[in-house]
């Protein structure tokens, strides 16, 4: 089985930076994903990491350390529309994708 | 239409009813999934179909019965459900279920309430 932990809630101010941490324990590793889910909507893909290091995609970056079982999603220049739930998901050696409970980010004006 | 479409978006049913959830994808994907999303809990994988063959049944109670007639359509048949089955049921698709990098595309979900 898999154990994926991320904070339940985070609050930040518009224009600021927020870092969402995710730790995991898994049987084998075939990649880590971050998804964004606005209330009442489908989760949408943000990023994929399979090798150690930082992947940057516009205002969003994702980091992975496989030896530490650790990832973070960095949201820069926060906008009100970034208020959403952010889901960390890990694919194991059998290609099964398991999700954390999600981190609800609230952006305040 | 594009993407993954789920119907109905909302469903209220009694414990003795029989209903079905439908999912359709227009992405040319070969894998389809059912996930259950309950408040404050991780998404729970229920079923996986890869090239129309069921490859995963994550110890789901038999009152949930999936059907995948082709690679574009996925159903979840519901009967004699319990109130604790109330949740958001998400359908997803991907190019192939046995690839590390393949990205899931989700539908908006069917919100189920069991009275």
Image (tube, coloured by chain):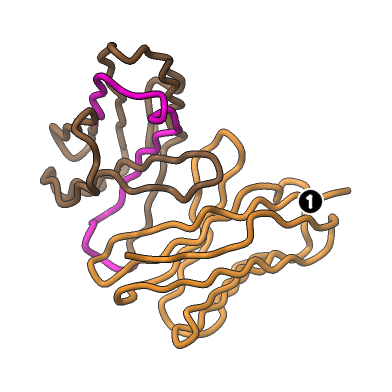
Q: Position of residue A68 (x, y in %)?
A: 50, 85
- Give the residue displayed 35% in from the left and 38% down from the top: B91
Among all residues in the image, which is located at the extreme right? A109
Q: Determine if the magenta segment contains residue B94.
A: yes
Name the quadrant of the C terminus of chain B.
top left
Q: Which residues are magenta?
A: B75-101
- Give the residue displayed 23% in from the left and 25% down from the top: B77
Q: Based on the displayed image, in which of its 4 quarters is residue B75 positioned? A: top left
- Give the residue displayed 61% in from the left and 68% down from the top: A73
Location of residue A99 with respect to B26 vertically, above or below: below
Disc 1 target residue:
A107
Q: Position of residue B45 (x, y in %)?
A: 33, 48
Location of residue B59 with respect to A53 vertically, above or below: above
Q: Position of residue A69 (x, y in %)?
A: 47, 79
Location of residue A60 with respect to A108 vertically, above or below: below
Callout 1: helix, strand or loop?
strand
The chain coloured brown carries which letter? B
Chain of the residue displaying label 1: A
Q: Position of residue A7 (x, y in %)?
A: 63, 61
Q: Based on the displayed image, in which of its 4 quarters is residue B2 positioned? A: top left
Q: Nearer the viewer, residue A96 or A61?
A: A96
Among all residues in the image, which is located at the extreme bottom? A67
Name the quadrant of the N terminus of chain B.
top left
The chain coloured orange carries which letter? A
Numbered circles on residues, count: 1
Location of residue B46 with respect to A103 vertically, above or below: above
Position of residue B61 in the picture relative to residue A24 (left or right): left
- Give the residue displayed 21% in from the left and 62% down from the top: B98
**Circle 1 residues within 10 Å: few <14, some 14–19, many ≥20:** many
Position of residue B76 in the picture relative to residue A104 (left or right): left
């Amino acid at each position: 089985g898999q154990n994926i932990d991320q904070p339940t809630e985070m609050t930040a101010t518009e224009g600021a930076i927020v870092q969402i941490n995710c730790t995991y324990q898994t049987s084998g590793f075939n990649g880590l994903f971050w998804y964004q889910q606005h209330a009442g909507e489908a989760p949408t893909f943000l990023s994929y990491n399979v090798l150690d290091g930082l992947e940057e995609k516009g205002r969003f970056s994702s980091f992975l350390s496989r030896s530490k079982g650790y990832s973070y999603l960095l949201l820069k220049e926060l906008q009100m529309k970034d208020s959403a739930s952010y889901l960390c998901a890990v694919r194991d050696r059998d290609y099964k994708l398991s999700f954390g409970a999600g981190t609800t980010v609230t952006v305040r004006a | 239409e594009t993407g993954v479409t789920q119907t109905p978006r909302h469903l209220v049913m009694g414990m003795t009813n029989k209903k079905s959830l439908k999912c359709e994808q227009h992405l040319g994907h070969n894998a389809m999934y059912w996930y259950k999303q309950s408040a404050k809990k991780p998404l729970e994988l229920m079923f996986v179909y890869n090239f129309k063959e069921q490859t995963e049944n994550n110890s789901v109670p038999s009152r949930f019965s999936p059907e995948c007639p082709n690679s574009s359509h996925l159903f979840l048949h519901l009967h004699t459900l319990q109130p604790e089955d109330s949740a958001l049921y998400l359908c997803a698709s991907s190019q192939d279920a046995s690839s590390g990098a393949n990205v899931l595309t989700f539908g908006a979900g069917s919100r189920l309430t069991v009275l």
